Amino acid sequence: MHPLNRRRMDFSDIVASVDAVISKPGFGILSDCIANGKPLIYADRSDFREYPVLVNAVRRFLRHVHIPAGELYRGDLAESLNLIWDRPEPGESCPLGGERVAAGRIARMLADARVRGRKSRSGAHGPRAVRSRRRR
């Protein structure tokens, strides 16, 4: 185990290159762990309102071990590091490719907006307004 300089490497690349992650749960780290199939050793995050939602995702989608915050901050990691490899694989998988889904939805919204724009220009008053502008 060794620290990495986050200024020299992209965080997603760091997560992809490790065997397991030790962290407090957050949306970014969970996304990276799920996308890369990385086990997570996680500590309590009492200052974060969404903590129960995040722990639910940890339990559903990741091989995981909970470590008491005191052990984490003291650096007592040996037991958790030994336990993580014996944990079962998650029962569920999270579909990836959200960027393609988002891009498709945006493209459909833009296409719908163009169609609505054409309809509003060709409505009952649209052609007269266009013709009257052309005569000037």
Image (tube, rainbow, N blue to C red):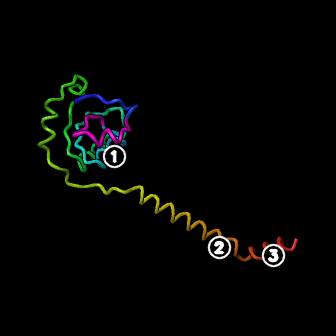
Comparing marks 3 and 2, which lies closer to the viewer? Answer: 3
Q: CA distance from mark 3 to mark 2?
A: 16 Å
Q: Earlier in the sequence, mark 1 or mark 2?
A: 1
Quadrant of residue 45 within the rendered picture: top left
- The answer to whether marks 3 and 2 mark residues whose Cβ atoms lie closer than 8 Å is no
Tell me the amino acid under the disc marked 2: Lys
Q: For label 1, count other residues whose C-alpha is less than 10 Å away and answer few (under 14), some (14-19) or many (20+).
A: some
Taking 81 as reference, is 16 left or right?
Answer: right
Sequence-earlier tag: 3 or 2: 2
- The residue under the point 34% across, 39% down is 26
Find out whether the residues at labels 1 and 2 contact each other: C-beta distance under 8 Å. no
Say above or below: 91 vs 40.
Answer: below
User: Which of the marked residues, 1 or 3, is nearer the chain's N terminus?
Assistant: 1
Give, as a single range, the part of the protein colored magenta.
Answer: 9-24
Q: Which residue is mark 3?
A: 131
Q: In screen coordinates, is 23 left or right of 132? A: left
Q: Amino acid at mark 3?
A: Arg
In the depicted structure, whether residue 112 falls above or below residue 24: below
Residue 133, placed above or below residue 52: below
Marks 1 and 2 sit apart, C-alpha to C-alpha, by 41 Å
Secondary structure category for the residue under label 1: helix
Residue tagged by mark 2? 119
Which residue corresponds to mark 1? 31
Residue 22 on the magenta segment? yes
Which residue is painted at 64% across and 68% down in the image? 117
Res 132 → quadrant: bottom right
